[in-house]
Amino acid sequence: MSVGEALPHESAALHVTGHALYTDDLVHRTKDVLHAHPVCSPHAHARVLRLDTSSALEVAGVVRVLTADDVPGINDAGVKHDEPLFPEIVMFVGHAVCWVLGETLEAARLGAEAVEVDYEPLPAIVALTEAIDAESFQGNQPVVARGDVSLGFGAATHVFEGVTEMAGQEHFYLETHASLALVDEGGQVFVQSSTQHPTETQEIVAHVLGVHSHHVTVQCLRMGGGFGGKEMQPHGFAAIAALGAILTGRPVRLRLDRTHDLTMTGKRHGFHASWKVGFSGDGRIEALEATLTSDGGWSLDLSEPVLARALCHVDNAYWIPHVRLHGRVARTNKTSQTAFRGFGGPQGMLVIEDILGRCAPLLGLDPIALRSSNFYVDGQATPYGQVVRHPERVAAAWEQVLTTASVAQRREEISAFNATHPHTKRGLALTPLKFGIAFNFTSFNQAGALVHVYKDGSVLINHGGTEMGQGLHTKMLQVAATTLGIPLEKVRLAPTRTDKVPNTSATAASSSADLNGGAVKNACEQILTRLTAYAAGRDIPWDELVREAYFARIQLWAAGFYRTEGIHWDAAAMQGHPFKYFAYGVAAAEVEIDGFTGAHRTRRVDIVHDVGDSLSPLVDIGQIEGGFVQGLGWLTLEDLRWDESDGPGRGRLMTQSASTYKLPSFSELPDELNVALLEHATEDGVVYGSKAVGEPPLMLAFAVREALREAVGAFAEPGVSVELASPATPEAVFWAIEKVRA
C-alpha cells in the first residue's frame, strides 16, 4: 500500500541536483524572449503628473514601454478591482507605474532608468497605529460574539487590559515571482507562472487583455516556495507578461529580482490588538473583549478573509464563555499585505497566548496549569458556533509532551540553573494548537482531477493543486496508486494547467491534499469500478486487464470531483460551521537567554502533532519541522522595518535584503528537535483518514516565545508580568529584561 509509506518528495532528487525546472528556467528553452523591468515610484503616496517614455525608447535594446494606454481590457490586477495595473496615483514606495521591455534584462533596466516621471507627493500613512488614529480603514468590520461580555466581566474575580502588537513577515521564498507568456498563431495566450492559483491568474490575465478565460491557459510547473505569497500576487505580473506578448508578438519574461520582490509584493499582515480579559479566582477565562486591527497595506487583496480567520482563531484551544471580538483592516501606504502560512490564524492565536502569558504571574498561577485548565472539552463550541470535535486530542498531546519531554524534571533543573546563574536564564513553556481546516469561503472547498490510464497500464494524473515544495504531488501519486491498487512507479503526475482541470481553488488553506486527494480518488474509483465490472470476478493482472478493457471499449479515463461536505458559513453574522475539522498540536520549548545582550538560543523543542492517519509521514514530518522554524522566524527574528520618518524616504521598506532582514537558518534550529505524530487520530470523511499539515505547525512556535517570557521573568521577582514584543528579537528581549529588572 502506497498511502502511509514514508517516501521522499517526488522531486527530491531533482531539487538537490539542480535539475528541477522552475518557471524562469524555461526562458533558456524559449526563442526571442523579451525581458520586463518596472519603473517604480520613490514615493509612498503621490499623483503621477507626467509620464514620458520617449527617452527609454532611445536606449539600445529597448523594444517597448507598457503603459495604461496599452491595456485593451480592464486596467486592474485585483479581484476587488482596487489594484490598478498602471496607477494614476501611486500608493506605496515601489509601486510600478509602467514596464519596459528589452532584448536583455540590462537593456530593460537602463530603459526603466530613462523613463521620466513627475509626481505630486500626497500625505502618506505608514505605521499601523497612524492608520488607527486617522481611522484609515478599508473593507468590512466583522464581529464575532457569544454570550454577554458585561455579565462575564461582572462575574470575574480578576480583570486585566492590555495591547498586543505583532509584526508582519516576508515570505522570502527561494524563487521570486516569475512569469513567461507566449502567444500562438491563433492569438491564444499561454502563461507559465509561479502561482498558487492558476485559475485566478488566468481570470486576471483574461480581463486585462479583454478576452474570455478560454483564450488564456496558465501552467505552473512547480514553485520554489510560496507560503501564500503566490496566491494573489502573481496575477498582475502574469498580466504584464501576457500584455507584452500580445503587443510585441514575442515571448515576454517577467522575473522580479530579490529587491523588487521584497519592495513590490505583500507580506504577512501585522496586527494591533487591544483587549480586556476576565478570569475566575481559579484561573478560568470568564470573558474576553478585543479589537483586532490588521495592516492591510494599500489595497484589500485577501485582507478580509485573513481578518475573518484571525477572529475565528483568537480562542485557540480554550473555552471562553463570553466573548466579543471586533475586526478592522487598516489602509496604509505600504505593499498590499496578503496570505501567509496560517492566513490570520497565527495572529489571532498570538493574542490569547500573549494574554495568558502576561496574566499567569498576576494570577499567581503556573502558565502550564493555566493553559490546560481552560482547554475545550467535549460538547463545547467555538465563539462562531462550531462544535469542537475531538478536543481530547489536545489533552492527549499535552500529556504526551509533558511525559516524553520530561517537563517536570527539566523545570526543576531550570530553577536550579537560574538560581546559580545571575546573568543567564532559562525558561520552558508549553503551548497548544487548534487550527480549523477549510477555506472560510465555502465555495472554494471543491477540486477536480483528470486521470488517464493508458493501454500499457501506466497512469497519468492531473489535478488542480500546485506544488511549491510541500509534497502535494507526492501525496497525490500515493493516493492514485493506492486507490487503483498498483505500484507507485506506474503513476506519473503532469504539471498543473487550467486547460486540464478548470475552475480550481488556490493551493492554500492547508486543504489541498484533502480537496485534490478527494478528486483524484474519485476519478480513480470511477475507472476502477468500470474495470472491476469488466473483470467480473476474474483475477487478472493490472496490465492485462487494462489492455483487455481497451479492446472491449471500456473508458479508461475519468474526471474526478470533490466537494467538502458539512460546512457552511454566514460571513455577515460570523457564525456557522466553516471548518471540516480541527488540526491539533502541542509543543514544549526550552530557551536560554543572555541578560547582557538579550541574545537567545532554543535548547530543545518537543512536538506532538495531529495529522490524522498520515498519507506520507516523511513529507508530514518535514512540513511540521519547516512550519515550526518559519513560525520561530516570525516570532523571534524577522523584523520588517519601514521608514516612518517625515524625510524623503518615508514609506520605504528598510529591510530590503537578507543582510538587513534576518531569516532563520541552521544556527537558529533548536539544539534538539523531537517530532512525533499523534497516534490513534484517524479523521472520518477525509482521504484515507488523513489531516492537513501545511499551516498548523507554524503556530507551534508560540512555545518558544512563551519560553522566552519565562526566561525573562526569571530576572524579576515572582509575580511580575512580562511584556514581550513580537518579534522577540535579542534587542526586544534585552529591553524586556531591563523593564522587569526595574
Image (cartoon, grey):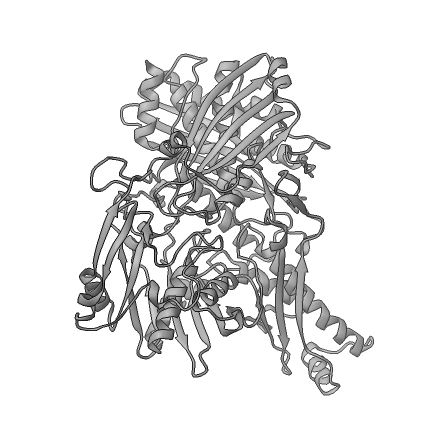
Residue drawn at x 38%, y 32% as measured from the top left: 134
Q: In this view, does 545 lie above or below 381?
A: below
Q: Where is residue 653 in the image (x, y as percent from the top left)?
A: 29, 44
For this orientation, the residue located farthest to the front is: 49
Q: Position of residue 34 (x, y in %)?
A: 30, 72
553 left or right of 645 in image: right
Q: Quadrant of the N terminus?
A: bottom right
For this orientation, the residue located farthest to the bottom is: 551
Residue 17 in sight: no
Residue 481: quadrant of the picture: bottom right
Residue 110 in sight: yes
Q: Position of residue 678 (x, y in %)?
A: 61, 42
Residue 435: quadrant of the picture: top right
70 left or right of 436 in image: left
Number of numbered discs on residues: 0
For this orientation, the residue located farthest to the right is: 536
Front one among 486 and 371? 371
Residue drawn at x 40%, y 64% as measured from the top left: 238
333 left or right of 356 in image: left
648 left or right of 572 in image: left
Q: Is residue 316 above or below residue 40?
A: above
Front one among 93 and 458? 93
Residue drawn at x 22%, y 56% as measured from the top left: 117
Q: Is residue 713 above or below residue 47?
A: above
Q: Where is residue 145 in the image (x, y as percent from the top left)?
A: 62, 30
Front one among 145 and 515? 145
Q: In which quarter of the image is the C terminus?
A: top left
Front one among 676 and 259? 259
Q: Is residue 109 above or below residue 143?
A: below
